[in-house]
Amino acid sequence: MGSKHLPPARGANQADVARRAGVSTQTVSRVISGQPNVRPETAQRVLAAVEELDYRVNHAASSLASGRSRILGLVVVSTNRYSSAALSVGVEKAAAEHGYTVATAAVADHTSAESVLQAFDRLEQQGAEGIVVGVPIPLESTTMRTRMSRMPTIRSEHAGFGEDAPFAVDQHTVSRLAVEHLLELGHETVWHVTGEESWQEAKQRREGWKDVLRARGIDPPPEIPGDWTPESGYRAGRTIAAIPDVTAVYVGSDEMAFGLLRAFHEAGRQVPEDISVVSVDDISLAAYAAPALTTVRQPFQSLGRAAALRVISRIEGDLEVDIPPTEPTLVVRSSTAAR
Amino acid sequence: MGSKHLPPARGANQADVARRAGVSTQTVSRVISGQPNVRPETAQRVLAAVEELDYRVNHAASSLASGRSRILGLVVVSTNRYSSAALSVGVEKAAAEHGYTVATAAVADHTSAESVLQAFDRLEQQGAEGIVVGVPIPLESTTMRTRMSRMPTIRSEHAGFGEDAPFAVDQHTVSRLAVEHLLELGHETVWHVTGEESWQEAKQRREGWKDVLRARGIDPPPEIPGDWTPESGYRAGRTIAAIPDVTAVYVGSDEMAFGLLRAFHEAGRQVPEDISVVSVDDISLAAYAAPALTTVRQPFQSLGRAAALRVISRIEGDLEVDIPPTEPTLVVRSSTAAR
DNA sequence: TTGTACGCGTTATCAC
DNA sequence: GTGATAACGCGTACAA
């Protein structure tokens, strides 16, 4: 009652703080943003006023005045693939460390150029200053390239454009680790279950797999298509189980490997006695497959971190950031054995 | 050269569009926000100008002027638990449908009141109008409650405060489905591996499990502690395998169930012949465990969606939203059998 | 139906 | 070291 005519209870603003501290708004602004040239005692007074009034900067106003939003856009697939989740976390952490907030836009699993472009739009509209893309993007599309050149944008899975050094996990190395491990165990050739074709990772791994085999004078067997899901792994497993003499398989993801193991089990093919299996990712359940999966670990969180740092450094222009290594490593467990 | 004195290439603004279309900024604003009372031809001219100038509204300015940010905050754990990932996707989708953007703040796994409060701060500072919390929060903390009352906030796992009707997945039902299934199969009692204690879900499930047993006149055996991870499931499995006469176990998550299965396998206890196992979540790999897991599916994505819609409707005040059901369902596979 | 003028809260520029 | 004052770009009474 009676409070009806009070202005809406927007929190305190700089002017309020300034009044209370007996300084100008400018000084308040300086103190808040940690600029120099403020006498310690003045700063104290301001800080006290901030505390008492429970003041917080209005992001919209700050952003409008400075032209900086400190928002990082992130595009991810709307399915909950392990890799996306881990990547997001890495991006978020790195962003937070540098005072950025992450705005997320999810796109459907099978991404079209349009859906990604729409995600870009939403993010750009929210004022994102840079974008980390965690989904496959059709680089052939010129509109896509134009859009990507408009603000710092980086695709997490592979090298950037132009001056950007490659920084993603080297999928060629991933394949090499997997295939050489199997070859060294005495297997004569290695079959490959691929990931979803639209992902660069999938292509690069397939090429890597072929290269390693050919370098040893081995003619690569036909590839078996997969789409990252355990279901597709199961189907691939049934296909492979029907082929005699297969002794070693390199699968594009741990999730598919679970499907593969089931198919082999049903077909009476023992892993690793009859067939060895190497997969990729090292998700938390990999060690709990039956048998425990030998897999090439990908440091997704580091990758997300690296992508975010890369974009932030591009936004800030000069900032030197310490980008963590994103080397894949082979984790040997029980799904592989000597021939 | 020569371009040195041009203003920074900020994109076109309303004034530019207005000039180009030969109207006032007000009219542009009206057209953009789809308000009525604009002659179709005028609107056309404006739209054309927007197109030509590639104009997009400045979110910061719009937000400052209107006091609305259309940003939804989301607090999630920084580990990549399946449930969090799925929840995020649900939130994101629902938000996008209503023109909201999601700002994410990740907090460490073992959440303290401080870390959640800090996440709130970051989100609030970004101008979030409401928050969906996907991590356990200590409700005892009065500061927490105060903060939560300051803006529409909802904890995804359980009922809201005050007038809010409960809308989360009913964990009591989850337990009932799991335990009754086992009891109906003829098991005399059911053991329980709990989730991380700080999560409401874990507590509610444990209570539900006890209630169902007691309702049948069964004295609940001691609970086995877990923390959602497969490792903790493995430890729990070893503990249980050492106890004679255990024939049925209800585990708090699929991930833990994988650990449990491994421990049982190592101990020579056959599932489901010797021991039946029911878990919770129905992650994509649940069907590919050995044996395939009987589990209580939780519609996490729907849950995220529901949480987001709930918050949005509170923000908008009147908006009637269609909140999807979030009923758990029992999925029977091969990890359970009659006694 | 359309335009004018002001306010939103902050930062930047330039004096002092 | 500190303070006026002017943008920043949009929404919104109010006037026309």
Image (spheres, coloured by chain):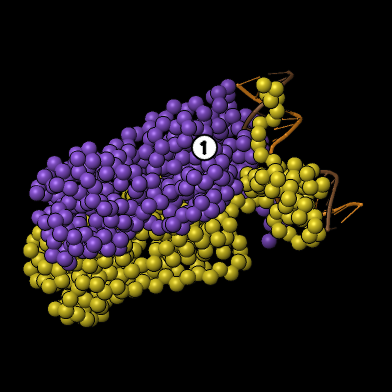
Chain colours: A purple, B yellow, C brown, D orange
Residue B52 vs B296, above or below: the answer is above
Per the image, the residue denoted by label 1 is A152
Q: Secondary structure at mark 1?
A: loop
On the question of residue A18 being in view, the answer is: no
Q: Nearer the viewer, residue B184 or A301?
A: A301
Label 1 packing within 10 angstroms: few (<14), some (14-19), many (20+):
some
Q: Position of residue B331 (x, y in %)?
A: 29, 73
Residue B228 sits in which quadrant? Answer: bottom left
Instruction: Give the total of numbered labels.
Output: 1
Q: Nearer the viewer, residue B167 or A1?
A: B167
Q: Quadrant of residue A174?
A: top left
Q: Quadrant of the N terminus of chain B?
A: top right
| Residue type (three-letter) at the residue carrying disc 1 | Pro
Depth check, front residue: B310 or B207: B310
| Left or right of residue A166, residue A20 in this image | right
Is A160 on the left or on the right of D3, as rendered? left
- Residue A146 in view, yes or no: yes
Q: Is residue A184 left or right of residue B285?
A: left
Rendering coords of residue B11 (x, y %)? 66, 39
Which residue occupies 65% across, 34% down? B9
Residue closer to the observer: A151 or C11? A151
